[in-house]
Image (spheres, helix red, strand yellow):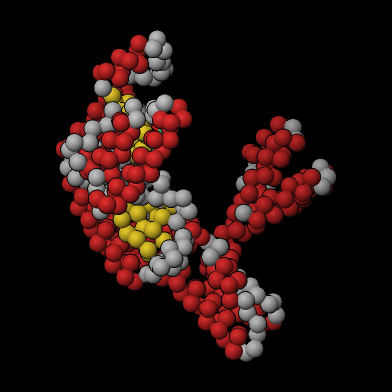
């Protein structure tokens, strides 16, 4: 691992040397202490130590961005840079998001020397809401809650549980290429092939979408957006984690089942003498949209049958009886509301008042009469609203 960190740190060293040659040095090395949007990457041990050494040798400062990974999320430490060793001390630390548990507050922490140098430039730092007592009180309360409710301990326990469960899922689902992270900062790296490590970007998008439909919010990160990012609030419990793992497992099974179905159908078709472009069907499965799985290749009647087999369960789920009844109800409700609004605006108020007062006794033929009196516009509104509802 130390060797690995040296290799990565050497890239920074090269850049520092290049910058020194070209422009006399380095200004700052700015990095998250664990790469979140970069793909939930945990630096190998010793990485920051070596990088900081190279940057400082080139005259640069080292900034640790703890906006996503700070405030106890990693469990073992309050700040993620601390996981790299007690001797790792950044020159500047930036804090944000979890600092106010939703309230907008952030902070920059630095040494007196740097702050004074900044002050000496004469540049006035101005911020309308900077240092306001409400935000400060909230940030203070957040620190108390982290401490009193032992949330760092929780991050470690639930995070370890999730790591263990994700590793079990990895045995079951070949799409999981890597499980990584620490505390409540975890990532599942999805790949189409564990050898080539081809990123499973569309699959990650599909899983993300299906989980969202089941009220589980994740995001896909990394340069190829193929890493499922688990960064829940650190009050997340083991029960929550169990639910998450169960749902994740079922979505992955669903995806694999659909893929097998398509592959099975295609195999059958090729036995029947149909030409199938094998790469195109795999591609089509990977468009990230289960509902839109399409068997491509040579379009002929047999393939259309194959498509129907796969689409059927999707169709009945999306356009089932409930949905039809719901559409009809909402169409009629919207129609009535639109008609009412139309009448309010098109006809004088006194008339509307009478409609309103007598609305319980108002009969259908009266509406028809109004429609006749006021031309085709109400009808148009009615038809348009029904069309909108059906589209919706
Ligand atoms: C890692 C990281 N650093 C910095 C920021 C910027 O934070 P702010 O929006 O508070 O300026 C973000 C925001 O998403 C972030 O994720």
Relative side of 4 to 192, left or right: left
- The residue shown at (24%, 62%) is 164
- Does 104 appear above or below 379? above
- Residue placed most toward the observer, 312 or 275: 275
- Residue placed most toward the observer, 236 or 114: 114
- Quarter of the rendering containing residue 105: top left
Residue 293 lies, in percent from the top left, at 57, 68
Q: Residue furthest bottom?
A: 272
- The residue shown at (34%, 47%) is 8
- The residue shown at (34%, 71%) is 172
Does the rendering let one see residue 174? yes
Image quarter for ligand 1: top left
Residue 224 lies, in percent from the top left, at 48, 53
- The residue shown at (40%, 9%) is 122
- Quarter of the rendering containing residue 11: top left
Does the rendering let one see residue 101? no
């Amino acid at each position: 691992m130390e060797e690995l960190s040296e290799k990565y740190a050497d890239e920074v060293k090269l850049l520092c040397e290049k910058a020194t040659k070209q422009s006399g040095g380095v200004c700052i090395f700015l990095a998250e202490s664990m790469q979140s949007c970069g793909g939930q990457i945990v630096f190998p041990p010793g990485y920051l130590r070596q990088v900081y050494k190279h940057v400082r040798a080139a005259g640069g400062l080292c900034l640790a961005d703890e906006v996503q990974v700070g405030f106890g999320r990693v469990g073992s430490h309050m700040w993620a840079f601390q996981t790299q060793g007690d001797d790792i001390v950044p020159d500047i630390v930036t804090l944000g998001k979890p600092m106010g548990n939703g309230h907008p507050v952030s902070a920059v922490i630095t040494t007196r020397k740097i702050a004074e140098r900044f002050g000496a430039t004469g540049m006035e730092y101005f911020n309308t809401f900077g240092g306001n007592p409400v935000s400060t009180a909230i940030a203070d309360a957040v620190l108390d809650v982290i401490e009193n409710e032992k949330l760092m301990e929780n991050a470690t326990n639930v995070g370890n549980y999730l790591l263990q469960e994700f590793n079990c899922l990895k045995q079951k689902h070949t799409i999981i290429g890597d499980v990584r992270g620490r505390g409540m900062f975890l990532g599942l790296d999805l790949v189409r092939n564990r050898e080539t490590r081809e990123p499973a970007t569309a699959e990650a998008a599909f899983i993300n979408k299906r989980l969202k439909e089941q009220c589980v919010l994740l995001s896909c990160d990394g340069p190829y957006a193929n890493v499922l990012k688990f960064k829940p609030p650190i009050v997340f419990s083991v029960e929550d984690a169990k639910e998450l793992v169960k749902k994740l497992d079922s979505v992955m099974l669903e995806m694999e089942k659909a893929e097998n179905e398509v592959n099975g159908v295609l195999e059958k078709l090729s036995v029947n003498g149909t030409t199938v472009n094998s790469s195109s069907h795999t591609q089509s499965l990977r468009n990230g949209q289960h509902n839109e799985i399409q068997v491509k290749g040579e379009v002929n009647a047999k393939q259309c049958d194959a498509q129907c087999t796969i689409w059927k369960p999707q169709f009945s789920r999306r356009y089932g009886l409930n949905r039809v009844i719901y559409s009809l109800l909402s169409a009629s409700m919207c129609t009535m509301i639109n008609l009412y609004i139309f009448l309010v605006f098109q006809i004088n108020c006194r008339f509307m008042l009478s409609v309103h007062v007598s609305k319980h006794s108002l009969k259908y033929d009266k509406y028809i009469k109004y429609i006749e009196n006021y031309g085709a516009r109400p009808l148009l509104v009615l038809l348009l609203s029904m069309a909108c509802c059906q589209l919706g």
